[in-house]
Image (spheres, rainbow, N blue to C red):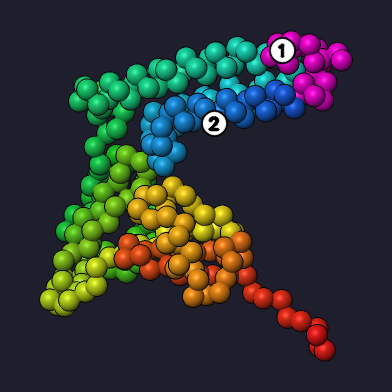
Amino acid sequence: MEGLSGLDFFESKESLTTIEWVLRGTVSFVFLLLVTKLMGQRSISQLRFLDFIIALTLGNIIAHPLSDEELGLKGSMITTIVLIVLYVIATWLSLKWPFFKRYLDPSPITLIQNGLIQFHNLSKARISIDFLFSELRKEKVEDIQKVSLAVWEPGGTISVFMDTQYQPVTPADMKLETQPFMISRPIIIDGKIDMSLLQEIGKDLVWLNTKIAPTNTNIRDVILATVTENENVLVYSKPKKRGLPGD
């Protein structure tokens, strides 16, 4: 069939068939997944100066060939690879050279200190007083004088630290005994067992079946089962269907 020979959808053409558009979109999607994995989790969790530039540039490079058949996909992918290599190099250099790191990830800017707004730093961070108070409200701060320190982070967030006398009382302050921290993790979801978690906690299927047996539930009928560090298993099973009257 015409349009399926070779990798025609990579090249610029006067028109693309429906299948070639599908192939171009699919290849771009997989390519972006690989690129994002190469960039690392930092670029996903926080968008800093260098991350913002890369995200903005890559979005434009990949978007154009996906909407214009006269633009080839091959050139965009090569350019993207070059930019990612430069991104990885710049990230590595920021770990080795303090000057380069300070340029890419500048130091936090103090906005409030001991209850006093540092107005000269507001202009330095390019944020308004209204925005500052908006962020303080998100942190449930009703009185700015209770703030010991508030800083503008390189990632575009404000970290707020209350004065010690206004911080919540903890069990440690009251010298109270507490239970050790334990987190629940899903070991069965929709009847499917997480074998890697089962292996991580050093247990087998026999142990899991023993834990589920008291609930009289088949593993296939388990919507969710969680396990804690002390090996407690909590099972959520599918509701049983009620029979018709007279059954």
Q: Which residue is mark 2?
A: 33
x and y, in percent, of residue 170 in the image: 20, 72
**Which residue: 35% across, 54% down?**
201
The mark that comes first in sequence, 1 or 2, is 1
Assign the N terminus to one quadrant of the image: top right
The secondary structure making up most of the magenta span is: loop
Residue found at the far front of this picture: 206
Element assignment for label 1: loop
The disc placed on residue 7 is 1
x and y, in percent, of residue 100 in the image: 26, 23
x and y, in percent, of residue 213 in the image: 50, 71
Of residues 100 and 197, the one drawn nearer to the viewer in this rendering: 197
The disc placed on residue 19 is none
Q: Is residue 238 above or below residue 22?
A: below
**Which residue: 44% across, 68% down?**
211
Tell me if residue 128 can be seen: no
Tell me if residue 29 can be seen: yes
Q: Amino acid at mark 1?
A: Leu
Q: Amino acid at mark 2?
A: Leu
Category of crowding for the residue at label 2, using alpha-carbon neighbours closer than 10 angstroms: few (below 14), some (14–19), many (at least 20) = few
Assign the C terminus to one quadrant of the image: bottom right
Q: Quadrant of residue 52?
A: top left
Q: Which region is colored magenta?
A: 1-21
**Which residue: 38% across, 36% down?**
42
How far is the residue under mark 1 from the one under mark 2? 20 Å
Relative side of 115 to 91, left or right: left
Q: Does 2 appear in magenta?
A: yes
Of residues 197 and 150, the one drawn nearer to the viewer in this rendering: 197
x and y, in percent, of residue 239 in the image: 64, 74
Q: Does 96 appear in magenta?
A: no
